[in-house]
Amino acid sequence: VYTFRNQIREARMSSEFPSKDGAVRNEQSGASADTTERPVGFEAAIDALPVPVYMLDSQQTVVAWSDGLETLLGLDRTEMLGHDDLFGRDGDGNLIKTLSNHIVDDPENADKNQSVSQVDSEYTDEQVYESPLWLQNDAGEDRFIRFTAAPIYQDGALQAVVQMCQDETAQRRKQEATEALVEEIIATMEQLG
């Protein structure tokens, strides 16, 4: 279970500094908080999607973050854009990797990681990966999230990875309750003989 903590926010706040052009840059990656030119309405478009999404560029930097992720994870766009450590670093300073990080590392074989599987999509010829897991958001709520992500290429080179975050907590809890009820019924029937 991953936990998103205020310490991550505080660490990020302390690692930002303004560049000569006035843009705020991340000290570790040097990436600007607004790293790409986007058409007007880009943020409105990703915010209108029925599933929260974010995008990493080929350098692992967050370049898009929908408002739905604030509801789901408790992390808003302003604290995420321009960062290359979505969920912080472990005690040894290693990046805590998300599905999209694994895809940036190896877009053709991200499913080598045991928590990642490749899935078929009738909508794209590109690889699509998923990683469903339980996590704990900033409010301390356990949520079951199905992360689905795909690489984006331009002229054969990886440009970005887009990741969707589908909250399936209600369905998962219903499934678990149904399975527990079935087990209880089977146990009762065995006792009755």
Image (tube, rainbow, N blue to C red):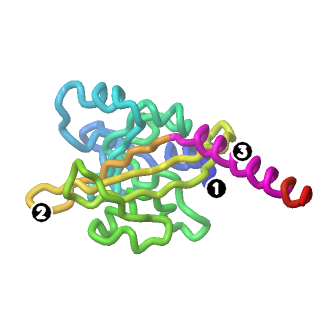
Tell me if residue 153 comes above or below residue 164 in the rendering: below
Does label 1 or label 3 sit earlier along the sequence? 1
Q: Secondary structure at mark 2?
A: loop
Query: Does the residue at mark 2 contact the one at mark 3 (Cβ under 8 Å)?
Result: no
Marked residue nearer the N-terminal end (2 or 1):
1
Which residues lie in the magenta part?
167-187
Give the quadrant of residue 48.
top left
Mark 3 packing: few (<14 Cα in 10 Å), some, or many (20+)? few
Residue appearing at x 53%, y 31% in the figure: 71
Task: Where is residue 187? Give x, y as percent.
Answer: 84, 57
Quarter placement of the N terminus: bottom right
- The Cα atoms of the two marked residues, 1 and 3, are separated by 20 Å
Q: Which mark is residue 177?
A: 3
- In percent of width and height, residue 173 lies at 66, 43
- Residue name at image x 56 percent, y 54 percent: 133
Q: CA distance from mark 2 to mark 3?
A: 46 Å
Q: Secondary structure at mark 3?
A: helix
- Give the residue type at disc 2: Gly
Q: What is the residue that sits farthest to the front in this orientation?
A: 193
Residue depth check, mark 2 versus mark 3: number of the one nearer the observer: 3
Q: Is residue 131 left or right of residue 29?
A: right
Q: Three-letter amino acid code at disc 1?
A: Val
Q: Which residue bears the numbered disc 2?
A: 156
**Viewer-closest of 152 and 116:** 116
